Amino acid sequence: MLGRTAPVAPLPDFGLPRPGRRHAVASGVLTVLAAVLVLFGLLAPDDLTAFSAEALVRVPVEGVVVAAFVLVLPPRARRVVAVLFGLVLGLLTLMKALDTGFYATLEKPFDPVYDWSFFHAGVEFLAGQIGDAATIGALAGAVVLAVAVVVLMVLAVLRLSRVAAGRRTAATRVVAVLGVVWIVCSVLGVEIAPGQPVAAQSAAALAYGDLRQVGADLREQRPFGEVAAADAFRGTPGDQLLNGLRGKDVVLTFVESYGRVALDDPAFGPKIGATLDAGTAELRAAGIGAKSAFLSSSTFGGGSWLAHSTVQSGMWIDNQQRYNDLLASDRLTLGGAFQRAGWRTVWDVPAHTKDWPEGQKFYHPEAYYDARGIGYHGPGFAYATMPDQFTLSMLQRKELSKAGPVMAEVDLVSSHAPWSPRPWLVDWNQVGDGSVFAPMPAAGEAPESVWKDPAKIRDAYRDATDYSLKTLISFVQHYGGDDLVLVFLGDHQPPVVTPQGAVHDVPITIVAKDPKVLDRIAGWGWTDGLHPAAQAPVWKMDSFRDRFLTAFAR
């Protein structure tokens, strides 16, 4: 007869979770992570300056409404709603990320209709810094990340909907309590922190704002042609244009990222202001005068082409669609007015590395120099294909030294981000084909090193802008005669180093040796010299063309 089997004592678990417990813990962790992701998508602001821990612990009305809706739906409809809500929330999260980047660099939210052109410019800038292969890798990574955000958001909403359906009674109570809390806090205006209401509806407001912006953008496209045609100078004969500048070479020069912050910020102003003051004294000693003020730019932190076309056309060009419409129009530009009046028109655009047929067709300059046709045989400097000194030296040799008046638009790019490495001035007689600049990039600090340190970034911007201004002053000293009129201005405030909320102002200066030129603008109230006073007039950038043409008409 067999004896009874003795009971087996259970093995000690040494505090380790059993398989069932491990699954429950993992499931709970996933649910918590899903809730955090969804709350982040609903509550995270689209501007880093508004980001705080308090912003993420509010009650989002969108989440309460969708949760209540899901609880009363049958399983199949619940899944459809969860997937759609996850897709929308994932895309909204990506829009917030774009807004964050645009606020930080351009002081504006991303415009889903007009702002795609900035990506092309950004890709070209990135390729110039890290190379094509690394840029392709970065873009691929960004696409994967964007897809992952949307997919994970959909999975998170699906998981939370399943959990809520599986605990319907408890979930219903939670949703009811949160709904009451939202209504009470909304009525009473309760805030968890200044500017952070407990009753949040930021996701819905952002989505509504984007939809309204799209509608406004689409409506805005229609009247452009009428606005472009309303031009007081459209039919003005050439013999009635710019008679006050007859015989002068006029050089309209845009200094990249030369914004008002360069003068007003304590980190930049002392050095750049001293350069402008010293330049004023040196030019005055040579009999050369100047007057300065400010223009309010149509763009901020980037989009230089928008500012250039605003100055040239006398129209407010603040987005890509308006820019495209302008290039397709026959609007009279400053260059076109000079050409009609008998000047030879020249475009000197060293940042252009590809064909630009639409721009050449619109501006129709008689000479066009880009990075490929300018005759430069020196090194590049990060974004800048060549130093500003070479750009101006080439213009002098190929155009200004010849007979006949010239009107030139010149774009100086040594002060374009990332601002390092940068060149230094050499004797103008040694510029030649640019080979003299060969040792300079290696003597500077690499962009990837500079951009790890905010203080270095600010120093690099200051010094690069200072170089561009010193180059202009030196150019006028070396080549400026009675027949040279230089108009130089910034295109926009610099990215990264300009505080959010700053004005869009950029300095503008007119330099001439012939006193009759500056007498024409004596009534403008501009500051004498290269350094505009803090109280100097501020005009909208699109007003400059008409004021300039009026001042020099006769």
Image (spheres, rainbow, N blue to C red):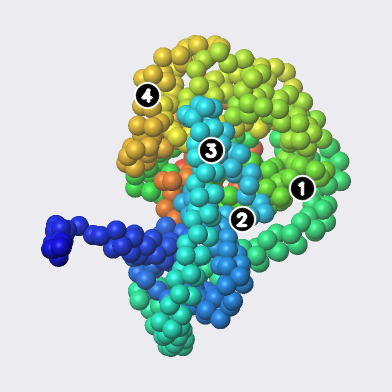
Judged by depth in the image, the label closer to the viewer, 2 or 3, is 3
The earlier-in-sequence mark between 2 and 3 is 2
Residue 111, numbered label: 2
- Circle 2: element type: loop
Judged by depth in the image, the label closer to the viewer, 4 or 3, is 3
| Crowdedness near tag 4: few (<14), some (14–19) or many (≥20) residues, C-alpha within 10 Å | few
Q: Residue at the front extreme?
A: 1
Residue that numbered label 1 is attached to: 325
Return the x and y of residue 328 as percentages of the image width and height: 80, 43
Residue that numbered label 4 is attached to: 444
The earlier-in-sequence mark between 2 and 4 is 2
Left or right side of 418 for 124: right
The earlier-in-sequence mark between 1 and 4 is 1
Residue 169 visible in the shown view: yes
Gap between marks 1 and 4 measured at Cα: 41 Å
Residue contact at pointers 2 and 3, CB within 8 angstroms:
no
Residue type at numbered disc 2? Asp
Residue contact at pointers 1 and 4, CB within 8 angstroms:
no
Question: Of 345 and 348, which appears nearest the observer?
Answer: 348
| Crowdedness near tag 3: few (<14), some (14–19) or many (≥20) residues, C-alpha within 10 Å | few
- The quadrant of the picture occupied by the C terminus is top right
Q: How many numbered discs sit on the rendered protein? A: 4
Residue that numbered label 3 is attached to: 140
**Residue at the image point whose x is 23% and y is 59% from the top:** 17
Return the x and y of residue 104 as percentages of the image width and height: 46, 51
Residue 383, numbered label: none
Return the x and y of residue 398 as percentages of the image width and height: 66, 17
- Circle 3: element type: helix
Residue type at numbered disc 4? Gly
